[in-house]
Amino acid sequence: MPTNRQILLDNRPQGEANVGNFKLVSTETPALQDGQVLVRHHYLSLDPYMRGRMNESKSYAQPQPLGEVMIGGTVGEVVESRHPKFAVGDPVVGMGGWQEYSVVDASQPGALRKVDTTHVPLSHYLGAVGMPGVTAWYGLVKIIDPKAGDTVVVSAAAGAVGSAYGALAKARGCRVVGIAGGKDKCDYVVNELGFDACIDYKAHKDAYSLAKALKQACPNGIDGYFENVGGMVLDAVLLRMNAHGRIAVCGMIAGYDGQPLPLANPALILVNRLKIQGFIVSEHMEIWPEALKELGTLVGTGKLRPRESVAQGIEAAPEAFLGLLKGKNFGKQLVKL
Amino acid sequence: MPTNRQILLDNRPQGEANVGNFKLVSTETPALQDGQVLVRHHYLSLDPYMRGRMNESKSYAQPQPLGEVMIGGTVGEVVESRHPKFAVGDPVVGMGGWQEYSVVDASQPGALRKVDTTHVPLSHYLGAVGMPGVTAWYGLVKIIDPKAGDTVVVSAAAGAVGSAYGALAKARGCRVVGIAGGKDKCDYVVNELGFDACIDYKAHKDAYSLAKALKQACPNGIDGYFENVGGMVLDAVLLRMNAHGRIAVCGMIAGYDGQPLPLANPALILVNRLKIQGFIVSEHMEIWPEALKELGTLVGTGKLRPRESVAQGIEAAPEAFLGLLKGKNFGKQLVKL
């Protein structure tokens, strides 16, 4: 049985999360029982939602239990199988957590899925052709539901969700405008991801200044917005939403660390008859096949070429995760195991 | 030609609205042209939306022009007609404005509608069986879309919209909880309107205290909320919304006078995957017939017995309107002309 290095949540953050909240341990992987599969993880996915799980407080999911392996998506290969549908060498995607190996009850629905790596690199099943891509798809297609010619905006545009959103929106004939932190990210969003424009929110001191920049980038106003960050960015976008605009709320990363960030002028919801809808993509499993098919095609045909930030080794995961929360990553944040 | 007393918007409010913003004038009603009808107004409707129109700033409608008759719904009778479909004595509802008479181009769609006063008193066509009732219907049926057993809440529960909302929600098997200002209103909401409970927001110093009271009144949480006021009440309700709850935003009267009132914790939209939708009922004319039919039946069968606050004479309109904005009215605020 191979030795398995794991990262546990050791204690909950007081304010900002830090490396001391995590603990690296080594264990032996247990012997398999009937129906189980041993997976060697190649990549671990790091995602903003994990920060919410670190808190004790009520959220859409149970808090991450203390002393247990941190939750997380993984891709890898089957190295041992006592399940008839999985063979050694199969490339698979699952929720293996922050560890090098996982033992999976493979008959549990959705626990483990074989993937095809002919046209799509394995790691992309954690990004563009995985949960972040489907998240972008759900928010854009099911909540924003844009018409050709609509202007749609996304924050954290250089990230895994943002880059998929851009490709999906362009495929629907939209004008797509990103918001990201820093000139490098904005250049990447426009030049490599093919957005029509991208605004560096760090160049603006308040929502009014950012709203002015949005006015230039969105001369016809904003019809749809995909929210990943909250705070000042949301306030600015609200000032530029068109009547009957739609806002999909997927993340409010700006407020994860401490006191809730207020929304400055909720009366704009009424003034512009907006629809604002929060969602988590795991509650909408019925749309995954359709979404994954479109995303796989976009990647396979080169219309979506997502970048990845890759940290090396399980021991690098906490630092890489904290960097993600600060926007240090460029595209999908992974850990190579 | 009869003399027509009118109230004009004389100047825009700086902060709180006051009687000095209005001006009473007298004019002669002009001679009718073909297709026109002269209506003698019996009642003028006063509604919170009018406050928004008094401002210059961007809103969902054009601002009320200065020096013109204030916009407003009216019921009355035809006193002269040069339109084949209207005869002297017909009871009618229209948007005659703050004046005693109006000359209406009766062939313009929706400008004037004959009503049946056999089972429904004329004045109710400005309230329960008029725009406020349809507003309640749209928010409840089209946005909140409750199932039997759901808990639904409305602010300004003793008002025209709130009372219709209560009857419509009870007809759908919901638990209905009101929020209103003062013990008298709350007693009325429970004892006369048949709500399951009503909370006096004035008895609470902040959103947390109000949220505690909501927890008692809504032991299973809140599935749907109809927002008329904003501010602290909205913050409190957000703390008690169930996952996948729906909020129909119809008014934010608390913020009409000055600086925008922030929303304390927008991250709850994500945590509870809420849908928040603003609307104005005049953009949904297609649902009016169905809504009016149900509301007329509720009133005709005594299941909805809305109260009215009636001010006497056109000259009393400004004072009555300012009182409405402060919640001094009890039920639908009218002016008897």
Image (cartoon, coloured by chain):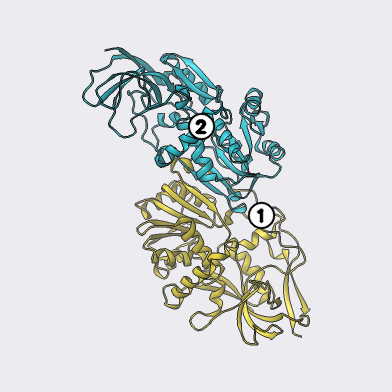
Chain colours: A yellow, B cyan
Residue B259 visible in the picture: no
Residue B33 visible in the picture: yes
Instruction: From the viewer's side, name the closer residue of A210 and B104.
Output: B104
Q: Quick one: quadrant of the C terminus of chain A?
A: bottom right
Instruction: From the viewer's side, name the closer residue of A132 and A5.
Output: A132
**Disc 2 designates what residue?**
B297
Q: Measure how far apart labels 2 and 1 are at the Cα level.
A: 43 Å
**Disc 1 designates what residue?**
A59
Q: Amino acid at mark 2?
A: Thr
Question: In the current view of this chain or complex, which residue is farthest to the left?
Answer: B34
Specify the quadrant of the image occupied by residue B197. Answer: top right
Q: Say if B254 sits above or below B148 in the image.
A: above
Specify the quadrant of the image occupied by residue A75. Answer: bottom right
User: What subunit carries mark 1?
Assistant: A
Whole-percent x and y of residue B211? 67, 39
Residue B268, label in figure: none
Whole-percent x and y of residue B131? 45, 32
Q: Nearer the viewer, mark 2 or mark 1?
A: 2
Q: How many labels were placed on the picture?
A: 2
Q: Amino acid at mark 1?
A: Ser
Whole-percent x and y of residue B103? 29, 22
In-image side of A80 versus A205 (left or right): right
Q: Are marks 2 and 1 in contact (CB under 8 Å)?
A: no
Which element is circle 1 on?
loop
